[in-house]
Amino acid sequence: KNEQKRRAKQEAAAKAKAEKAAAKAAADAAEPSKPKAAAAAAAGDEEEEEEEDAGKYFESRLAYVNGIKAAGGNAYPHKFHTSMQIPTYVAKYAEAVAPGAFAEETGVALAGRVLSKRSGGRGLVFLDLVGEGAKVQVFADASKFPEWEGLDKEARNAKFIALMTTLKRGDVIGVTGTPGKTRRGELSLFPSSMLLLTPCLHMLPKSAPGRPALVDKEIRYRQRYLDLMVNPATRHNFITRTKIVNFVRRFLDMHGFLEVETPMMNAIPGGATARPFITKHNELNLDMYMRIAPELYLKMLIVGGLDRVYEIGRLFRNEGMDLTHNPEFTTCEFYWAYQDYNDLIKFTEEMLSQMVLNICGSYKIKLHPEPKDGQEPKVLEIDFTPPFARISMISGLEDKLGEKMPMPLEGDEANAWLLQQCKKHNVECKPPHTTARLLDKLVGEFLESQCLNPTFICDHPKIMSPLAKDHRDLPGLTERFELFANYHEMCNAYTELNDPVEQRARFASQAKDKAAGDDEAMFVDEGFVTALEYGLPPTAGWGMGIDRLTMLLTDNESIKEVLLFPAMRPVGMPADQSVGCL
């Protein structure tokens, strides 16, 4: 509301100044010898100066736009015909035109945003026009505009200065002219006409040597459009994200998988151990849960005879927010009949190694983590050359702890032993102290912390894996793996449990944990058990988080850097009401 009042006040003040601003612009055009115009004309190849006060800048620009409207003009044209996009222009003319020469084509029209504006002396202005990740210089020369051919030099320059005065950094403009290069060899467009298409009312941030134009994370995350506008690295992050999604989709399609869509709202939140978001279905007067995983629906499709299915989509988990977690995130899950987790290990190695090679140009990628206080910057290298390392969870943890774990894990002795190990090694585990939670904390401390390069942690206990099939050789364990890289989970997969009696018993065990206070434990889903009673073939299932993989391949430590619009606390909310959130 305060923001709306502020804008209304600014617009009212700007409207009152509209005619005055229009008259001033006309006067400036008629009298180019005024100090300000003369200074701009004589500035040499220097960046155009802007009003330092952002509020005054906004009022000035809004007054200019209102002046155009008051005079019967259109500050926001409906259409501008372009000959090509800027990347196409660069690709077509970068090598085809020699320094100091022009292309044969004339009347080439480009549109884009003005990222910088420099004066080159009276009658010359240089603009950097950007669009679709590419940049081209606009070499504006007053003597090259046909509409002013009949005017003497002073009158022509006056018209030129009046036009250039209306174009600011951030404006979207259309330019028509002749492709060419300067004598220094810079690809340019030499305009014969220029048109303001959309004025930018706010002052853009400027970049300093060696620094991005916009570094404030609060602004970057809340105003992602501004971040994309001025920081090329941000654009690169999201292009890479799209390449990852496209690669996964093509890879699965080539292996005969069918992409499907499953419900986003469920009566029972199943398929994962997580705390769900609750919403309301008004027509049915029913509480619904935003999905925490599509797993159960996808396995129902396997029961129905769709032997290879996958889904790429959003999941919602009402849990903490930190550098690697966001309440909504993107995953890919697939299910493959007549395969097991051994097949999926090989399939995962093939998919990810080929993806990294395809997108990054090498199996090896370099990360540059932010150094902690007092530490020297370091570079980490992660090698995706297959095969990846493997660690069996229980035996690996026993090796690290130097003790044998009591069996069975479902017993009170095992729970007490794990709790004692957490205390002994100062591993924090908040209540409830279920065996699954204690194991998860110890594995994170002693095994996941060793997984810089891609590593499979395999053979999870049944107590941690309510949907995975019993291990055929290791009693009490399951045929499951999680892939870790850079110490974070990337994938989770297992041979699927397809015994309906065993599945109902596992659900009952989860319900016991939920009753003990574990709000991430699974609900009992009788509809899914009924589907299993019709017969789920031997099946392997796999899930991967798109966000964390994008973090890895773009050298980012925060998930917010790879989400276009990450979850943020409301402006004005005290920080202690939104722990872990900016």
Image (cartoon, rainbow, N blue to C red):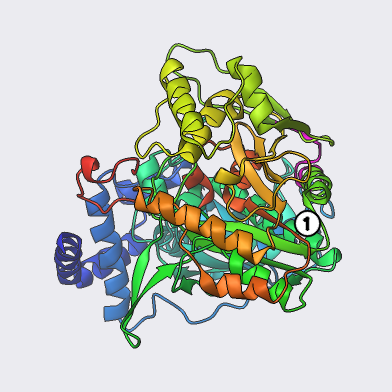
> Along the line of sight, which residue is nearer the eye, 353 or 133?
353
Residue drawn 57% across the image and 27% down it: 406
Quarter in which the C terminus is drawn: top left
Residue 277 x %, y %: 38, 62
Q: How many marks?
A: 1
Q: Is residue 311 above or below residue 98?
A: below
Q: Residue 93 falls in which quadrant of the image?
A: bottom right
* 394 displayed left or right of 563: right
Q: Is residue 119 left or right of residue 200?
A: right
Q: Inspect this view and state whether residue 66 appears.
A: yes
Nearer to the camera, 74 or 350: 350
Rendered-image quadrant of the N terminus: bottom left
Mark 1 residue crowding within 10 angstroms, few (<14) / some (14–19) / many (20+)? few
| Residue 142 in the image: above or below residue 493 | below
Q: Quadrant of residue 180?
A: bottom right
Q: Secondary structure at mark 1?
A: helix
Residue marked by disc 1: 91
Give the residues in magenta: 355-365
Side (left or right) of 113 relative to 277? right
Q: Point out residue 14 in the picture as x, y percentages from the top left corner.
A: 20, 66
In the image, farthest residue toward the bottom: 283
Residue in the foreground of this view, choosing between 305 and 421: 421
Q: Is residue 38 magenta?
A: no
- Which amino acid does the dot numbered 1 rest on? Ala
**Is residue 312 visible in the rendered structure shown here?**
no
Percent position (x, y) of residue 190? Answer: 65, 59
**Residue 440 position in % (x across, y down):** 52, 36
Q: Nearer the viewer, residue 461 or 9?
A: 461
Q: Is residue 230 above or below residue 193?
A: above
Is residue 359 shown in magenta?
A: yes
Q: Is residue 127 left or right of residue 58?
A: right
